[in-house]
């Protein structure tokens, strides 16, 4: 029966491809969803997964992002319903879907020139949001079914790269949590440098501080130092931000090289006003104290706030 179903899928997909080439995207989508429901009712998960993966890939290659995302998320949900555990084969299928998303090939400067009401802007925004939704669902499935505890680095790499290069709004915050999980600090450094050049001059030190502290919340002192070194080399001493907040970052990196919790307390108190420019910085420093020195949060409210931030940054 499985073989017969897959043979049927081949014929179905050939018909669907013809429908897509003729521009009948909605018709093709409804046909896939109907067959998926039948396979699911019969618990023929293999045929369903094959259909959804192929259908999503075809829709995406025809620039039908909304349809492709819907089928892609159904694919991930069906992996769960089938009781499938994380493995290399499933990861590869997810990567194939991610690679199928359409892309625009423009510079960050050109993206900033897009008119927010234009069709190009709205299409780019829809693609980025769709990619984010699909990939986050896939990463959650990987984590929940035996994959790396922070999600596969390959998927974080794909997600950070797409959100950074494809979002019509130049927003590092959406890509940053995935950059730091991707295992490619050089790519994150390039993005940080580009963003610092493009952003409001009054925000430059905040951008770098957030980026360094984010690495440190994961206990990654090596890449935090690498980031600072790369930014200094790229900008030069004359353009590297000089502010109390940058002084804090400098002293913090030195402090974390040793067992010096009292010094961290002193730094936090002395630079309290500068950290409060962004409440997220305060939260990051609390996380760093817990990560490096085992210091517990002072109140339950802080813990709740930390969990809230984490939920929306992952």
Image (tube, grey):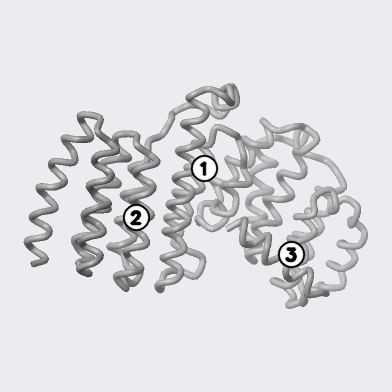
Report the residue at 32% width, 40% height from top: 60
| Badge 3 or badge 1: first in the primary sequence | 1
Q: Position of residue 82 (x, y in %)?
A: 29, 70
Q: Position of residue 64 (x, y in %)?
A: 34, 37
Identify the residue under disc 2.
94
| Vertical placement of residue 57 versus 143, above or below | above
| Badge 3 or badge 2: first in the primary sequence | 2
Asked where in the image residue 116 lies, by quadrant, the reply is: top right
Q: Which quarter of the figure is the C terminus placed in?
A: bottom right
The nearer-to-camera label among 3 and 1 is 3
Q: Position of residue 12 (x, y in %)?
A: 14, 47
What secondary structure is marked by label 1?
helix
Residue 69 numbered mark, or none: none
Identify the residue under disc 1.
163
| Badge 2 or badge 1: first in the primary sequence | 2
Q: Position of residue 98 (x, y in %)?
A: 37, 47
Report the residue at 68% width, 59% height from top: 309
What secondary structure is marked by label 3?
helix
Identify the residue under disc 3.
305
What secondary structure is marked by label 2?
helix
Measure the C-alpha gap from mark 2 to mark 1. Answer: 17 Å
């Amino acid at each position: 029966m499985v073989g017969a179903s897959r043979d049927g899928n081949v014929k179905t997909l050939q018909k669907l491809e013809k429908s897509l080439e003729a521009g009948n995207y909605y018709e093709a989508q409804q046909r896939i969803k109907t067959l998926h429901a039948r396979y699911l009712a019969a618990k023929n998960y293999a045929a369903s997964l094959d259909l959804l993966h192929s259908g999503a890939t075809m829709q995406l290659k025809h620039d039908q992002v909304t349809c492709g995302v819907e089928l892609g998320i159904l694919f991930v949900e069906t992996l769960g319903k089938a009781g499938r555990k994380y493995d290399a084969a499933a990861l590869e299928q997810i990567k194939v879907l991610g690679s199928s998303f359409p892309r625009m090939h423009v510079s960050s400067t050109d993206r900033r020139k897009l008119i927010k009401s234009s069709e190009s802007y709205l299409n780019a925004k829809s693609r980025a949001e769709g990619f984010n939704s699909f990939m986050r669902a896939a990463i959650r499935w990987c984590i929940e079914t035996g994959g790396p505890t922070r999600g596969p680095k390959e998927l974080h790499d794909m997600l950070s790269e797409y959100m950074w290069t494809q979002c019509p709004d130049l927003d590092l915050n959406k890509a940053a949590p995935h950059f730091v999980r991707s295992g490619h600090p050089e790519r994150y450094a390039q993005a940080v440098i580009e963003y610092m050049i493009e952003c409001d001059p009054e925000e430059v030190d905040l951008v770098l501080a957030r980026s360094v502290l984010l690495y440190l919340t994961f206990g990654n002192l090596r890449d935090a130092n690498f980031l600072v070194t790369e930014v200094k080399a790229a900008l030069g001493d004359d353009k590297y931000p000089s502010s109390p907040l940058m002084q804090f970052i400098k002293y913090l990196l030195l402090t974390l090289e040793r067992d010096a919790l009292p010094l961290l307390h002193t730094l936090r108190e002395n630079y309290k006003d500068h950290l409060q420019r962004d409440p997220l910085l305060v939260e990051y420093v609390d996380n760093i104290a817990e990560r490096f020195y085992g210091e517990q949060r002072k109140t339950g409210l802080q813990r709740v706030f930390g969990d809230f931030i984490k939920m929306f940054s992952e």
